[in-house]
Amino acid sequence: MLLAVDCGNTNTVFAVFDGDEQRGQWRIATDAQRTADEYAVWLTQLMSLKTLGVGDINHAIVTTVVPGTRRNLTTLLESHFGVTPLVVRDPNVDLGIEVLIDRPEQAGADRLVAAVGAHLRHPGDLIVIDFGTATTFDVIDSDGNFRGGVIAPGINLSVEALYTAGALLPRVNIEKPATVIGGATVPAMQSGIFWGYVSMIEGMVPRVAAEYGKPVKVIATGGLAPLFADVTDVIDATEPDLTLIGLREIARRNGIS
């Protein structure tokens, strides 16, 4: 079985694949100071609830956008699971796509993995919107190659910025308000956050598509994707596990069946 690890700025997700079947998925807050032993205690306990053990893992693959986490994640897999992981963006790991931007080395590993997963599930020209720590709009061509995109502040960052910078503004939940015009501070903030991001999506997608010059399918991913996909027609499909799908495919492209 394959253990796939997606380490983002906010959360780290572990998933076990038996072939294409996902046997379990677990999420923990990203912390560069968390040791391999701490990961092991947490992860093996959760795996046991799915009747999975250390001995079931034959291979591993890791993507991380937080450099400080790589060493401890690699130590976890080597010392506790007995496997040497593939690490996305290492020279020996073939993604199976081209990165067709001015500075290919600057493309985030998470964006490239999502590109692989998106093309696997939805062949053709794509815009992938990822609602993560940042909100990204990435263009994937019909051959699956990464063509660049847009990086905007994530929704949670915007919520935190309002709370931190506004002395009298509370921290609010991200949810669809009952009305666009807020009758009090909290619903007014929720409207600005929610409908503001909907407006950004509906404004950005046509601009990106027009500049790209081809019809595109729009795929949304990330934990908040379903919340926004339900209120706008510009999103064609939602894929919450796009990065994990991409990691599974990259492992296959590198000889792990």
Image (cartoon, rainbow, N blue to C red):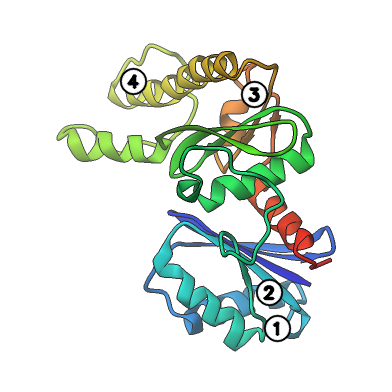
- Tell which tag, 4 or 2, sits nearer the viewer: 2
The label on residue 188 is: 4
Q: Is residue 216 above or below residue 171?
A: above
The answer to whether the residues at label 4 and label 2 have Cβ atoms under 8 Å apart is no
The label on residue 79 is: none
Residue wearing tag 2? 47
Counting every numbered tag in the picture gives 4
| Label 3 or label 1, whichever comes before in sequence order | 1
At horizontal 71% and vertical 30% (from top left) the residue drawn is 237
Q: What's the amino acid at mark 4?
A: Ala
Residue wearing tag 1? 54
The answer to whether the residues at label 1 and label 2 have Cβ atoms under 8 Å apart is yes
- CA gap between label 4 and label 3 equals 25 Å
Residue 170: percent from left, percent from top: 26, 36
| Label 4 or label 1, whichever comes before in sequence order | 1
Residue 37: percent from left, percent from top: 49, 84
Q: Are there few (<14), some (14-19), or many (20+) residues within 10 Å of tag 2?
A: some
At horizontal 47% and vertical 56% (from top left) the residue drawn is 65
| Label 1 or label 2, whichever comes before in sequence order | 2
Q: Are there few (<14), some (14-19), or many (20+) residues within 10 Å of tag 1?
A: some
Residue wearing tag 3? 235
| Label 3 or label 2, whichever comes before in sequence order | 2
- CA gap between label 4 and label 1 equals 49 Å
Element at label 3: loop
Q: Is residue 27 above or below residue 219?
A: below
Q: What's the amino acid at mark 3?
A: Ile
